[in-house]
Amino acid sequence: MIVIGSRGSQLAVWQARHIQSLLKVETRIEIIKTTGDRIQDVPLSQVGGKGLFTKEIEEALLDRRIDLAVHSLKDMPSELPAGLILSAIPEREDPRDALLGAPLKEGSRVGTSSLRRSVQLKAMHRGVSIENLRGNVNTRIRKLDEGQYDTIILAAAGLRRLGWADRIAELIPVDVMIPAVGQGALAIETRDDQGEAHRIAHTLEHQASRIAITAERAFLAVFGGGCQVPIGAHATICGSEIHLRAFVSEPDGSNVKRGEETGSDATSVGQALAKRLFG
């Protein structure tokens, strides 16, 4: 019996069940509440620390209470705890951000808890009002429908997974709003012991997704890998060539830097672009 650890949100449980359906062994899902789940009334950028949605799950892995964990890859810090490994990155879903609700215009009340989205949104549409939005996908859509916001921004992948694709008013191109590192991808984390869970999980590996996300996470690692700095990165693969587009700014949205880098080694591409923008 392989025990799968997951957060308890509707999207997290969908993701865990999706991975469960792909594994060819007997499994059960263990729900674990994380720090990020407990703190719902404060913007993530103000909570501080890394691994807000992963720390308790990783502790359960290390304590052998679970055998593998399923995460949204964008929730994962750039460095894993000693003894753990990303055993598989399955094929990535759509990485783009999506607008729900009314078209953006002067004075629109836009709901998001993401510094990354807020900074890029202000660059797209000056004059919009950015308001904090927390909660699971259903809660955020309900708040939009209640009129608390004119427009909200969510990841397209989560909306598609939960059957809300018909609510997407606009998909924002990645060259306009660069996604979060790993957005749209799942991560399967296990102990780094080459055990049964690692071997089983690794059967779900998608090489192109791994290469792209390796470049994005290498970019993130140079900046420390937390939620306190607005950062986006998106890599694409064409043959043996990796193309990375990324941005970073100060937390208040000033000093926005964007850049692109191309190369054949994912880690080198990510680090080179980060160091160029960091300087």
Image (cartoon, grey):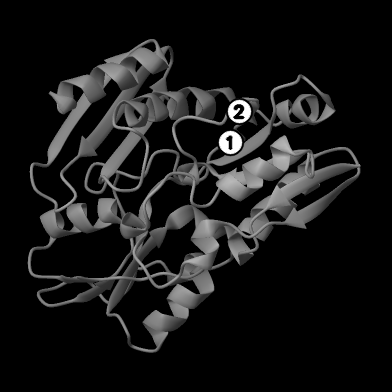
Residue type, numbered disc 2: His
User: Residue shown at 23%/58% (left/top)?
Assistant: 118
Determine if residue 49 is in view.
yes
According to the image, label 1 marks what residue? 91
Which residue: 44% across, 32% down?
Answer: 78
Of the image marks 2 and 1, the number of the one nearer the N terminus: 1
On the rendered structure, is 64 left or right of 258?
right
Secondary structure at numbered mark 2: loop
Comparing 37 with 271, the one in front is: 37
Residue 279 vs residue 205: left or right?
left
- Spatial distance from mark 2 to mark 1, Cα to Cα? 5 Å
Kindly identify which residue carries mark 2.
206
The residue lying at 25 percent from left, 34 percent from top is: 246
* Residue 26 rendering spot, x and y as whole percentages: 91, 44
> Dot 1: what SS?
loop
Q: Is residue 236 visible?
A: no
Residue 259: which numbered mark, if any? none
Badge 1: how crowded within 10 Å, few (<14), some, or many (20+)?
some
Is 241 displayed left or right of 5 in the figure? Answer: left
- Up-down relation of residue 187 to residue 21 (above or below): above
Question: Furthest-bottom residue in view?
Answer: 146
160 to 186, vertically: above or below:
below
Q: Is residue 240 above or below residue 142?
A: above
Is mark 2 in CB contact (under 8 Å) with mark 1? yes
| Residue 179 vs residue 166, the one in the foreground | 179
